[in-house]
Image: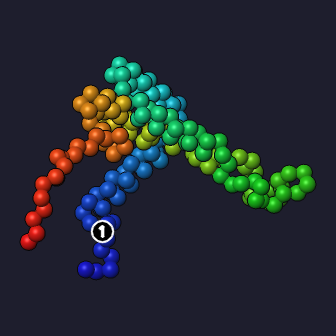
Amino acid sequence: MSEGDGVGDSVHGKFFTWLGQIYQSWLDKSTSYTAVWWVVTLGLSCVYMIRVYLLQGWYIVTYTLGIYHLNLFIAFLSPKVDLSLMEVSDDGPLLPTKQNEEFRPFIPRLPEFKFWHKGIFVAMVCTFFEAFNVPRQIKHMIKYWYIPFTHGKRRYKGKEDVGKTFAS
């Protein structure tokens, strides 16, 4: 083995690195189409909600998607640089003093286009697999008396041994 062998050097690693680079370049080219991205995102969200409503399931996946989007939204509203750690005068943060410095009062920690990928697509894919439909799985377990936890599980005992013991 050479010192460069690792996950990134395998055929699968190179393939996924190549796929990631294509995906990132596609994302970089598409960031200028914000209106289109918002329309596509809202359309996919509506399709996802209609699918979940009609199939009556995947509530845990939907809840997780909501928490994920809330986390992204908070990161989008948070500043990239914490102003409390910067040099601050009595009147607030200092304005730029040189010609080549740009005044940017708020730079979000998460760029806007990061909202549009992964979350809804992953949630939509999860709705095609019954294993992710957790409440339906629980109903199925209750129906067939399958309890995966040891608490409250019946334990069957054999007949008590009241016979003689034989010494060897």
Residue 97, relative to residue 42: is it above or below? below
Left or right: where 72 falls relative to 158: right
Residue at horizontal 35 percent and vertical 40 percent from the top: 152
Amino acid type assigned to the residue bearing label 1 in the image: Asp
Q: Quadrant of the N terminus?
A: bottom left
- Say which of 165 and 6 sits in front: 165
State the image coordinates of residue 20 (x, y, percent, origin top left). Answer: 37, 53
Taking depth in this image into account, of 122 and 116 the one nearest to the observer is 122
Q: Residue 76, image x and y in percent? A: 61, 43
Q: Secondary structure at mark 1?
A: helix
- The image shows residue 93 at horizontal and vertical percentages of 82, 53
Which residue lies at the image location 90% right of the left edge and 51% below the top edge? Answer: 91
Between 18 and 142, the residue placed more toward the observer is 142
User: Which residue is identified by label 1?
Assistant: 9
Rendering coords of residue 94 (x, y %):
83, 55
Which quadrant would the C terminus be assigned to in this image?
bottom left
Mark 1 is surrounded, within 10 Å at the Cα level, by few (under 14), some (14 to 19) or many (20 or more) other residues, namely: few
Residue 9 is drawn in which quadrant?
bottom left
Q: Residue at x 28, y 80 (%)?
A: 2
Is 103 displayed left or right of 91 in the figure?
A: left
